[in-house]
Structure formats: C-alpha cells, structure tokens
Image (cartoon, grey):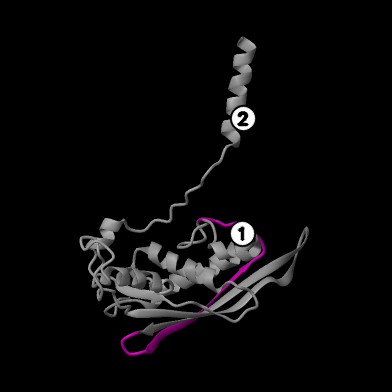
Amino acid sequence: MKKLFILGFISSLFLFMCGPTATVTTRGGPTISQVQRTTPYEKSRIAVARFNNKTPYLVSEGMTDMLTSALFNTGKFIVLERENLDVVLQEQKLSSVGVIDKRTAVPAGMLEGAEFLVVGAITGFEPNYRGVKTAVGGAKQSYVAVDLRIIDSKTGRVVSTVTVEGKATDSLISTGMLRWVGAGPLASSLRAWSNTPIDKAIRICIDKAVDFIVNYSMKKGGEK
C-alpha cells in the first residue's frame, strides 16, 4: 500500500510538471478607469500608420505594432488606434442600426482625432548584414533601419524626421539597455526571428524610435 501511494504521488507530480502552462507578459500602461478619466487635452494624441516596407521581409505589421505598444507604455501619449479602426467603426455601426441594447450602445461621432501622425518606412532589414571577426572566431551582424516622420495632422506639416538603426551580433537582451521596449515576446508576425541577433536589432531600433518621439519631437509649449 505504501509503495502504491508513493507511485501515485510521483505520477501526480510528473503530470503536474508536464501539464499545460501559460505565460503572461505585463507591458504596463494605465488601467481602463485611468484612461476614462483622462481628458483629450492632457496629453498629445498620436497615431501610428502602417510602416511602408522597402525590404523583402514581411515585417512592417509587426514593427508597427511594436512601436504603437511601446508608445502607449510610455504613458506620455494618448495613442489612437488606426490599424484596426474598421473594428471600432463596425461596433458603432451595429449600435446605430438598433441591434444592440440601447443601454450599452456605443454613440457615434466621438472618435478622437490625432494631433500627430507617425509615418515610417522600413529601409533596412538584414539578418546577415555583415561578418564580424572576434578573438574566438567570427559572427554575423544583423541590421534594422527605419525612417520616421512626425506629421502635424492639422496642417499636414512634417515637424520632425529621424532615421533610427539597430545593429546586433548576439540575441542577448540587457533590460537596462532598452528603455521603452523591454525583452518581452516579439510581435506575433515577427516570432520567427525570436532569440536571434535580428530580434535584438529590431528592439534597439524601435527603442531608439520611441526615445526620439518622447524626448525630441513631441515637446509642448517650447518645453526643453
């Protein structure tokens, strides 16, 4: 009986250890109630357009999503959805045709307009950019480059431009190195590059882009 108990305990422990698991990555940002209390005038309203992809790799959607999420996580902007705006409009349409309970219907005409638009182009994405010789052998360097323009939506005027680059020879991410992006999972469409040098190059590039937008291009009222 004692042996049976021990075998049963070991089997249960084995099943527990090998069972399904889930990982939740916390990205920060305000709560829903905090967002609802924020007026449209407390922060700059910003929207990110889909990056124009000038490389042979299908990476524009993922990098656009990463920049949008990183800008939101700074807590310094009201970030407006533009990539999936059709989903919001469809919900408003359902409310307007009377198929949704009036008590929960979403009123139309309340979408917020963006003060600034971020428009970008991926001009470089090279997993094997160049060979690098080291004391113990060689390594491949990866390279990512993005051209960004910040546009005043009221006037259509380009208020700032920047080219940001990311280079890496290894896939190790230092949490102190990346101020805004962090070392969480890549966007789903970029997962094929996870834990490779191009993964790190992408993060460095996006992090530099956010840093530029936060610290140089979006100052209000002549703030230095």
Tell me if residue 212 comes above or below residue 22 in the rendering.
below
- Quarter occupied by residue 188: bottom right
In which quadrant will I find the N terminus? top right
**Distance from label 1 to label 2 (Cα)?**
29 Å
Q: Which mark is residue 194?
A: 1
Q: Position of residue 24 (x, y in %)?
A: 47, 49
In which quadrant will I find the C terminus? bottom left
Tell me if residue 200 comes above or below residue 151 in the rendering.
above
Q: What residue is shown at x 59% (from left), y 67% (from top)?
A: 201
Graded by Cα atoms within 10 Å as few (under 14), some (14 to 19) or many (20 or more), the crowding at tag 2 reads few
Residue furthest right in the image = 137
- Quarter occupied by residue 173: bottom right
In reply to whether residue 169 is colored magenta, the answer given is yes
Residue closer to the observer: 50 or 182: 50
> Element at badge 2?
helix
Residue furthest top in the image = 1
Residue closer to the observer: 6 or 152: 6
In reply to whether residue 167 is colored magenta, the answer given is yes
Q: What residue is shown at x 42% (from left), y 71% (from top)?
A: 84
Report whether 34 appears left or right of 86: left
- Quarter occupied by residue 81: bottom left
* Magenta extent: 153-175
Q: Amino acid at mark 2?
A: Phe
Q: How many marks?
A: 2
Graded by Cα atoms within 10 Å as few (under 14), some (14 to 19) or many (20 or more), the crowding at tag 1 reads some
Q: Position of residue 218 (x, y in %)?
A: 35, 76
Residue closer to the observer: 28 or 81: 81
Q: Amino acid at mark 1?
A: Ser
Q: What residue is shown at x 63% (from left), y 72% (from top)?
A: 143
| Residue, disc 2 | 14
